[in-house]
Image (cartoon, helix red, strand yellow):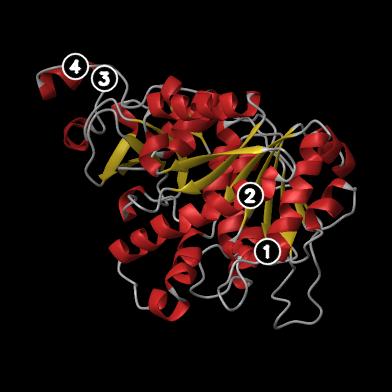
Amino acid sequence: MNRDAIITSAKRVTIKVGSSLLLTEEGDPDLYFMEGLAEDVATLIRKGKEVILVSSGAIGMGREELGTEMGRKYNTISSKQALASIGQTRLMNMYYQLFQKYNLSVGQVLLSGVDLSHRSSYLNARNTFFTLLRLKTIPIVNENDTVAVEEIKFGDNDTLSALVAGLVNADLLIIFSDIKGLYTSDPRKNPEARLIKQVREIDKDIEEIASSTSVEGRIGGMQTKIKAAKIATRSGIPVVVGGRKRSFLKEVFAGKEVGTLFLPQKGSLASREKWIAYGHFLEGAIIVDEGAKGALVKEGGSLLPAGVVGVKGEFEAGDSISLLDKERKEFARGIAYYSSQDIKKIKGMKSSFIESQLGYKYHDEVVHRDNLVIL
């Protein structure tokens, strides 16, 4: 499928907007940009598309509300959470007023990692999005910074946008930022750097390019956008990364080759597979031998204790874990049937010895194929 077909056929679109676009260099809300964003989203909805907006900017607007200098003094986690609480109210009020001009309603959706980690709350969030869309209301999503702690944070809204796109089965994810797209090298350092218009597969070369073009210390740089694109394309969702200009959305849907298009991967994940692969926070890891990896990857088998050679971290039965090969590279994720302590006792053994070793037996498998996703 070519670019025009991908863009024109997309009915449900997730759009992520970064703080650098919503705020001026002085830290004030950029009304010129926000008015243009509202107009472009309203145009898409008039054309029959459904739009989910993932918006950063709450902490920045909280600082601006208190006064930029005063806001900068607050750098502790609790202070930033307070700023997010103040700023989120203002951010939503601005979106409400902007979309009211087009007779469109908005609904606030605040998510933390724990909301997507449990299957029941994952499905509840999904149903909330679908209901809002049926009501012709624009879901405006942000991380719930007021309560999220480091252990349950998504880390950046690029990642959050990819997870939301997968959650709602979006047809397209647009990451709208202050960058034009992915370049062959850092355009600030190399005048010969070229914009990469299309990426078929996110491989090591693409990840290395993203690493070399990221701004040190910045949350939401190109590395996080590549990570987000990897999640979304694995879920069968094409991604466009780019921006800089206020007219970026118009140009995307007018068929212009702006930004970088990441093509979806074949064999996209089903809903439960997306949840297993990306909805959980990983509690630990299991290291497997080459024979077990081959059985999992090539034959679609389950992981038996005989194939386990090591355990990393502490986790309980039912926790989400990584599966690592002998080089300690992650190749799969799954849900463990046994705790880390139990697996240490039965690693390398045949399943028939589990009960005699532990005194009980849940299953023959350490991770069953129905609870495992190859990455």
| Left or right of residue 169: residue 61 | left
Residue closest to the eye, 223 or 73: 73
| Residue picked out by circle 4 | 361
Nearer the camera: disc 1 or disc 4:
1
Residue type pointed to by label 4: Lys
Sequence order check: which comes first, mark 1 or mark 4? 1
Image spot of residue 182 (x, y percent): 72, 63
Sequence order check: which comes first, mark 1 or mark 2? 1
Answer few, some or many: residues within 10 Å of disc 3's Cα (few below 14, many 20 plus, some between 14 and 19): some
**Residue shown at 42%/44% (left/top)?**
325
| Left or right of residue 46: residue 177 | left
Asked whether residue 1 is in view, the answer is: no
Sequence order check: which comes first, mark 3 or mark 1? 1
| Residue picked out by circle 2 | 97
Answer few, some or many: residues within 10 Å of disc 1's Cα (few below 14, many 20 plus, some between 14 and 19): some
Sequence order check: which comes first, mark 4 or mark 3? 3
Answer few, some or many: residues within 10 Å of disc 2's Cα (few below 14, many 20 plus, some between 14 and 19): some
| Residue picked out by circle 1 | 31
Return the mark for residue 351: 3
Residue type pointed to by label 2: Gln
